[in-house]
Amino acid sequence: MSWNTSAVCGRFADRDSKRASIHQHVLKHAIVLLQETHGTLDEIQAYGQSFAETHHYFCSPGTTSATGGLLTLVSKTCLAKSLIPAVVVPGRVALVTISSTTHSLVVVNVHNERLGSDFEIVKSTLAPLIARAVADPTRFSLLLCGDVNIPKQFVDHIVQSHNSHELRSGGEEWLRLLSPLLEIHQDEPTRVSLTSSSCIDRLWVSIPSWCLPHTRIISATLWSPLSRPGLSDHAPL
């Protein structure tokens, strides 16, 4: 599951009730990627600790407690020989390598917002991993998802699009980097505001196309931010 949880570690009056509501959904999933947690390292770790009975947790705070923040959870039921975390850009891009004796899965948690020059760090880190996943799929896989801030309409009209938010997010550079991977498409909006809606929460995997009949994405309607007031202005995937 991937979800921009909109300041779940922030400091606000109904934080505990919001966490309790999110908690029940998180426990259903083996791998959980939460973005825009906000909070200090201690605050995100304390929240991660609330899942410690069922999940391993890995934290990356943003540059301030009011921006960014990532929390990655991996179920203890996963038969992993090792779990190796790495932070690429604090609070924005982090990964965990989950390895068994025969296979490794790299899970990349992304909150793409104003990366700027840091994108070169992201590119130099992820490009070799993507290349390896494509070249050796039986022993190495990669899953990248999160709030990538690349609206679907930008993908559909990449040449004509000049929206400032899309350009700020480095959409074209991201799509070029991720092009060897397979995007699991979904058409329902993952973020709904009073003025617009868009599919900015996305998922890419290094699986061959013949696996597609066995994959699916669930978001919007039932998960719509409009039907879950107080949790997040994003729908989870």
Image (cartoon, helix red, strand yellow):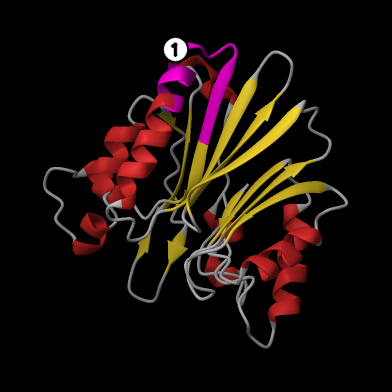
- Figure disc tally: 1
Query: From what the image shows, is residue 210 above or below residue 118?
Result: above
Seen at 50% across and 76% down, the residue is 66
Residue 125 or 234: which is nearer the viewer?
125
Q: Secondary structure at mark 1?
A: helix
Find the residue positioned furthest to the left. Answer: 160
Find the residue positioned furthest to the right. Answer: 53
Name which quarter of the figure residue 45 lies in: bottom right
Residue 64 or 52: which is nearer the viewer?
64
Q: Which residues are magenta?
A: 129-143
Query: From what the image shows, is residue 156 above or below residue 197?
Result: above
Residue 191 or 70: which is nearer the viewer?
70
Relative to residue 42, is residue 162 drawn left or right?
A: left
Name which quarter of the figure residue 6 lies in: bottom right
Residue of label 1? 135
Q: Badge 1, how many Cα within 10 Å: few under 14, some, many 20+?
A: few
Residue 170 or 89: which is nearer the viewer?
89
Residue 218, given in percent of the width and then of the height, sits at 58, 46
Residue 17 is covered by the magenta coloring: no
Seen at 71% across and 64% down, the residue is 22
Relative to residue 53, is residue 25 drawn left or right?
A: left
Seen at 25% across and 49% down, the residue is 154
Find the residue positioned furthest to the bottom. Answer: 13
Residue 100, given in percent of the width and then of the height, sits at 73, 21
Residue 90, given in percent of the width and then of the height, sits at 49, 56
Seen at 64% across and 55% down, the residue is 59
Name which quarter of the figure residue 155 lies in: top left
Residue 74, given in percent of the width and then of the height, sits at 72, 42
Amino acid carrying label 1: it is Ala
